[in-house]
Structure formats: C-alpha cells, structure tokens
Image: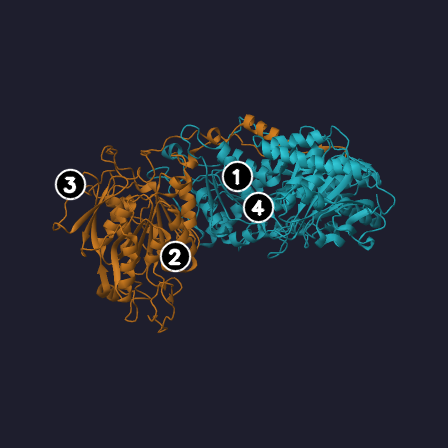
Chain colours: A orange, B cyan
Amino acid sequence: MADGRSVASSPLPSPLPLAWKREPISLPRDRGGGPGRGLLASRSHPIPTPRPPNPPQPRDSAMTYLAKPKLHHPSLAQNKVCYTRRDYEGRVSTLCAGCGHDSISAAIIQAAFEMDVEPHRVAKLSGIGCSSKTPDYFLGNSHGFNTVHGRMPSVLTGANLANRSLLYLGVSGDGDSASIGIGQFAHVMRRGVNMVYILENNGVYGLTKGQFSATADQGSKSKKGVVNSDSPIDTVSLALQMGATFVARGFSGDKKQLVPIIKAAIAHPGAAFIDVVSPCVAFNNHPGSTKSYDYVREHNEAVNRIDFIHTKQEIVVDYAEGQVIEVEQHDGTILLLRKLHRDYDPHNKIAAMNYITEHQAKGEVVTGLLYVDNNAKDLHEHLNTVAMPLNTLGAKELSPGRAALEKINQRLR
Amino acid sequence: MNAQLKTHQLQATNDFVVKFANVNGSGSASANELFAKAILRMGVPVSPRNIFPSNIQGLPTWYEIRVTEQGWLGRRGGVDLMVAMNPQTWNQDIKEIEPGGYLFYDNSRPMPASKFRSDITVIGMPLTEICNATYTDPRQRQLFKNIIYVGALSALMDIDPSVIEQLFSEQYKGKEKLLDSNVKALHLGRDYAKQHLGPIGLRVQRSNNVGDRIFVDGNSAAALGCVYGGATVCAWYPITPSSSLAEAFQSYCQKLRVDPETGKNRFAIVQAEDEIASVGMVVGAGWNGARAFTTTSGPGVSLMTEFLGLAYFAEIPITLINVQRGGPSTGMPTRTQQADILSCAYASHGDTKHILLFPEDPKECFDHAAAALDLADRLQTPIFVMTDLDIGMNQRLCAPFDWDDSREYDRGKVMTAEELEAGKDFGRYLDVDGDGIPYRTYPGTHPTKGGYFTRGTTRNAYAQYSEQGPDYLYNMKRLLQKLDTAKTLVPQPVLKAAAKPSRFGVLYFGSTSPAMDEALEALREMNLHIDAMRIRAYPFSQPIVDFINAHDQVFVVEQNRDAQLRGMLINELEFSPKQLPSILHYDGTPITARFITQAIAERMQKAGVG
C-alpha cells in the first residue's frame, strides 16, 4: 500500500450523547391494541380522562391562513373519549363557499366524533389539489401530510408500515388519484393497506381553474364550453378490480348516507375506498356537467343506506323485516345495510362490478356500500410484521449483534 | 494437438491477471468464482471483476481475476492468461493478452494458425470432446465443462486441489451426489492437463497475505449495514446494479430479524411499482419515525427527484443507496461510473443540497449504510450512499465487519410526549439549538401538543402555511445552517501524505480507492511524490479546503465525463479551476492503477516535478 508519512482517518459519526435525548415513554391515552383497533373506543375500556386543554395558538402574526377560534361551550356534548365535536375540527376552510369538499370534511368530523376516534391517533395524508388541502380543515390535533401530486398512496403505505397502530386517512382528488396518481391508487388497493381512502371526485381540476380530470364523463362540458372526448375512469370499478376490500360511493350532498359509510370504512381492517361525488361550485356545477349537484341528485341510484353500530350496542334503526342484512366486521363491529334493492349483495364482488357497469350505462351514479370483504387482510398481515409498531423498535430488537456478525465474517472467508 | 506458437513466456508467481471469456447463461460464473476463491484460500489476495452485458443470456460475459500477492485490489489492466471460451469475442479477447501471455481455449475444433498471435503461448484442450464423451445430459456437458477447465488451470498453476475440494464440500454440504460429480469433473481436468499440457509460467504459491479479511460484494455489505443500522422499512424497485442489495436485505432480515418468539418480522420490505412509489414509501415511513431506505441507480434517482425535494424541504429523514452505473439515460447499465454526483447532490427543483457518502469498499458500504440511517435521523434530510457497480456487484477483499454492541441508534431530535407535557416549546421548524436542525414529533405522540402539518409549501417555524418571504428565507437559510452542521457529522476525508513534501495533491473518492493506492505506490517508485486525500462525503468539510489550499495543483480523479465532483469543489469552495485539473476515466470499466499512474506522471512531469 502507499506508505505515507501519516494517515489520518476520522471515525464515522457515532451517536452523540444529547441532553435532550431520553428514553421513550408510553404514549398518553394510547391503549395499544392491534392494527386499526386501538383507535376506536372499546366498550370494555371506557376512557374516563377529561377533555385535554386547547392546543397552543399560532404565534406568527404574518400567517396566511385562518385559525379557528377554540371556544368550547361547557354544555357541548362529549363522546366516550371526552372530546366534543369541536375537537375534531381543523382550520377554517379556504375552499370556495359551497364546495362539496367542505361537506366531506364535515362528514369526516362527524364520523370521527361518533366513532370516538382520538384525533391525535389519526394520520391524515393527501396529495396536491383542492381536495388535498382539506386535511387541514379537520382533526386539527392530528399529524397531516400534504405530499406530492398523485403520490399520497405510497407515502401513506410507508407511514402505515412504520406504525400500524394509527388510523390512516388518505384524502385525494380525481386529478390526484385518477390521472397522475392512478398507478399508486391501483397499487395501494392491491396491497391492502389498512386505511380509509376518500376520493373527493368533482371531475375537474379546480386549483388550475377548470380543466377536465380523468373522471369527467365523455361528452360533458367544461365551464368554458369544451366538450370532453375522453372516456371516464370509474374509480369504484378500478378499486374493486385492484382488490380493495371495502368499496363505497357517496355524494357530498347526502351526509346521512356518507357519515355511516365513513364510519364503516374506519372500522374496516383493510383497504377501504370511498369515492365521493363532490361538485366543484366554481368550475363544474353548470348544466353541461355530470358532476353538478343537480345532475347527481337527479341520477343518484342508492343501492343501500347503511347504519354503523358497535358490537352489542342497541340497534336503533327504522327498517322493515327482510330489508336489512348484517355485515359483521373483523373487529366485531357490525354494519347494517338498508337494502333499497332486495337483490343487492355487497359481498359479491362480481355482481357489484356488473351492477355498477349496468347502471353506469344508464347514466346513473350508484351510491352506497358496493362491496365489502368480511375477511379482509391488511399489508401487515401479508408481510407478517410484528404487532409492535416498527418505529418503536430499537437497537436491542433490530441489531443482530456482534456475535452474529462474526459468524457472517467467518462465512465470508 | 496444441498450437504451441513458441515465444517468450511470462513468468509470475502470485501476481498476474486471468480473464475468462464466457457466454452469459453458460453457468461459468460459479466456476470462475470457485477459481478465485481457491487462490484466496491459498492465502493469496485476489481481486475479481464481473464484466457482463445488459441481457439475460447468450451474449458475452467476462470474469477477470487479478491475483495479487501485494494485495492490490484495483484493476491492473492487461491480461496474462485469457481463458477464451466464447468464439464470438475471440479476436477482442486475444488482443487483450499481454506480450508473452497465455491463451487457453477449447480446441475440440481445430483452428487455423492465423487465429492466434505469435507472441503468446497457446494452450488447447478438447473440453467439448471430453464432456461429450463423459456426459450425456446437455446441461451437464455445459456445466462440467467449466469445472473441467478450472481443474486443468489448477494443475497448470499448482493450485492445491484439496482447497477446491474443500470449497465444493462447503458448497454442496448435504448434497453428496453433486459434491462427488463436481470433484470428478475437477480431476478430469487436472488429469488431462498433467498428461497433455506443459507447465506455464503463471503459478500460485501458498502465502499468508489475506489475513482476516473477508471476501464480499458491496451490495451484500450495504444490505447488512442497513440491518445493523436498524432499517425496518425498505421499499425498492428492481434496477441493475442495485437489485441484489434489496434482495440481500430481504435475505439477511429473514435470517436475523424474525422475532424468535412469535415468528413475526421486525422488518417490512415492499417491492414497489416504480421508483417514485419506493421513495414515497420511504418518505412516509421516515416521517412516521421508522428507519427507512431505498436502493436504486441513476435512472431511479431521476424518477425520485420530486420526492427528494419534498423530503429536503419538509425535512424528512430518508436513506438512499445509489449503486451508480453508466449514464446518461440507459447509458451502460451493466458498467460502472461515478456519474450521479451532481444529480444526487442537487436532486429536485429549486435550491437543494443533499448529503452524499462515498464508501470505498464493502466494509465502508456496511459502515456508511448504518451511519446513513443515523445521519438521516439526526439531520432530518435525505442521505445518499453513493456506491457503484464496481463495489456493489464485485466481491472484494476488505476488513471484516465490525459492530459495537453498545451502539444505540441516534434518533435525532424527537420531542417526546413527556417533553411536550412538561411545556417544552415545540415549533416544527424552529431552530432551537442554532444548528439548523429543528425538533420533530412522531404522529400520535400527544393528544393536544406536537401535532403539525407537513407540506412541501413554505411554512413558518410553527409549520403553519405561509407565503411570506421572511418565512421562506428563514427556512432556506436554516437548511444551509443544517448543512454546516452536517459537515461535522459526516465521515471525514482520509489523508495519505506523500513520503516527501509535495506541491501536488490528488483528490479521489469511492471505488477509485484501490487503484489509487496502487498508483501512489507506482508514482513513489518513479520518485514522483504526491499527497492524496480520499473524500468520503459531501458537504465538503474543512480538511478538504485546507488540503487544496496547501497545494499548487490538486488533481481530481473521477469516473465520469464532466468532472462532476471537481465542479462542485470549484463552485462551492470557490477555488480556481486551474488549481483543480481533472483526471477522468469513464468508459464503463473500473479505473486502473496504470491509467492513474500514467495520467498523474505525465502532468507532474509537464508541470515540473517539485
């Protein structure tokens, strides 16, 4: 080797002792539990802790967003985890007044409140676009992540792999999911990532002022009078084809139907997809549009209206015998489906695909719970990962140790 | 039968180059590797290199073994013995043989004298004929042909057959039938050589120069570094030459990372649908507090750049291992280069600067991979480990892997629920310590405190959306401050000072290292003294600045066309281009000691030595 007068070599960086570094402590209010379950209030473990104090207010006066005042009326109703509905809100929406997306945010807030979800145990992820701005407008105490256009599914997948104990809420738009991100959309469904994926579908690019998205119907007109010549992508059919184990479609203007669908999706232990038709008041709510309020109301074909209840909770629904089927979820929760069509069976994937296609041909928008697999498995089950979130494992669990390394060295000689 | 075209014959013991020219898919790779390992087991260092085409099978492939008593691990250049098993490349292969060298070929079909060179010794052996007479199965005829030539060469070079038999017994443990048939083929070759072929001038003699070094490829080593460094999430997309890294990670994890009590995996590996998704998953996992990495090569980095900008600006720890290959575009996908330096350092749009680490060999692939995971968490930014095909896919002798069992992972500045509860001020992008690195919280930490919104758009120190110029400037300047901090944390350069003071210096990095070591020695023997510094990371730390300042001229040796590292040195450290002349090698083959020696010697002599 080249002999030198001296050879200076600095060691690789080693962990530095840091004053602020401490042993991890258990998470407050974290009840642990299996994937997708620790989030919901378990009836056997009521949460008696008082409502936590308000979060610190932002300090910078030069901000370009609107903070929502956090005033809690003492008489506001609390749920089982001691939160009021206001605790599920976020910042003031900066979307256009009347935007369907705001109605969806409101439905998410209501569903999370009614499901006794702890807001901070939710990770909300989105791509880019009007819809993807909405996670800022609900669950203000949870971590949010605005990723890049069309790529939210991969980020959500990675986040889910890192910590399986949180509830993953992916919010996306039709441009985000059906155009630039259709690849990731397809693959996140086939992997069975445990999540609620809400597609806020308005058939148009709102942020860039009204271009067609890939879900815009052929022959529909843009606000500027351009006729769309491309065939639309039906995300519900695509999700079914790709292996999503919970597939539903809602309408932002029908909160009664949408809230239970979201609740059922939260309880579903696998890839849950909800396409929500959500008219864009600025660019796609005109007579030539097939994603306008009027058009959807006129062409809405609801296959069922569902109520969501926890196991053993009293069933309070108004239904006639023979018109309801029960769908038991993995975690023991039960879906009640009010069948508007006697023959519609949400367990039959092929029939669901046929049904959707048939009604699409008639120009009808089929809404409701279209398909659910009671035996859904999620990505962690496929990968056989440990129950402990991977982000909690330390050197003790992860490093095989020096002795094992020496054996490897020995084999390499 | 042998076309012995008599000439001067090269004579060398434990110091020569053998090259095997084969057809891809003929099963020669394991036989050639066996040959290399046999020499290694005799205590003689070897340095092998796969030279292979970008196809599945049928095209030419080469395996070059440098036998080197002195332990030089770079390519030397030239071939002393060519084992020419591929008629397709015959002319090209013969040309490479050094004067006085040897040609070994299958003479089952006689060839005219015009197909040979007059200054080499030709050794013919009817390999096909022997195989056809011995085996009936066509695949066996092909596979054992390789073992038979290994046997013949072992006899010609005095390689101890018991060493090869031992290797067989390790390889075919529990598969006695395979063991026996391979041993039989080996001796078939040996016996023929002893009876029909004369001795040659290249010999292997037992030595003791291997020491406790291990023989491993860089991709396996980096994968093991990721296991020891605590990576739990790996998302990847197949691309040569990095695929074997992810596959090795999977294999090591299955052996070393399964919870013995539950049988469950302490790792998650996803083969993503493309490079964009693979880095997206790594970003998601890094954001959520898991150690995550992806492995790729140049074209993959191109696809990942939008996410890299997000990870840089939103300050998310991720690790990328870039096993570089020849570019641009598909370039030379199975050849080596160091040509992604710029595209990785400044990946994405806008102003970005990413940390790069440059391992020199498999040992450093292991060390740097583990260190990258620490650095990513500490600095909350993308870290690139910049290996290349030469290190990644070739087995190389290196120091054994080492690990300190008391080593804890540096998780960086993560604010806990306890600290938040105690009222510690949390501003996601607040530079509390003046090192440019803010605190972060993992999602789900605390019911009311520490939650924030991560986005690629500008925000203030409290992670609130902002389009205010001062907020933007605050973040961008702080990111530079973080880069300054990084300079103190990344692996520092290694100085190899000349025996005598010199006004010349040379900077190099990564896989150039073994060739440079040998070149420095050759220069010294020519009485040309030059100080050398091996750069191990970007951003460039102060010792590099001092080194350049201390010399009139500093050559920058790189394996790319555009002198990418030199450009960065000039731009970032504001040196005069004249002070940093380039020495560039970028034909896709690993740089050789001969090339470096010649280039430096010419320039030093031209500039007036001393």
Q: Are marks 4 and 2 in contact (CB under 8 Å)?
A: no
Q: Position of residue A374 (x, y in %)?
A: 28, 45
Q: Which residue is mark 4?
A: B242
Q: Which mark is residue B249?
A: 1
Amino acid type, residue under disc 1 in the picture: Phe
Report, in whole angstroms, how far the alpha carbon at label 3 lies from the one at label 1.
51 Å
Crowding near pointer 3: few (<14 within 10 Å), some, many (20+)?
A: few
Question: Mark 2 or mark 3, which is nearer the start of the sequence?
Answer: 2
Answer with left or right where residue A155 lies relative to residue B142.
left
Residue type, label 2: Ser
Q: Is residue B564 left or right of residue B295?
A: right
Q: Please name whichever residue, A249 or A279, is drawn nearer the observer in this view of the structure.
A: A249
Residue A356 visible in rendering: yes
Which residue is rendered at x = 23% and y = 49% of the image?
A260
Q: Quadrant of residue A10?
A: top right
Chain ID at mark 3: A
Mark 1 surroundings within 10 Å by alpha-carbon count, few (fewer than 14), some (14 through 19), many (20 or more): many
Q: CA distance from mark 4 to mark 2?
A: 30 Å
**Where residue B522 appears, x then y in whole percent?**
80, 40
Q: Is residue B185 above or below residue B114?
A: above
Q: Are marks 1 and 2 in contact (CB under 8 Å)?
A: no
* SS assignment at label 1: helix
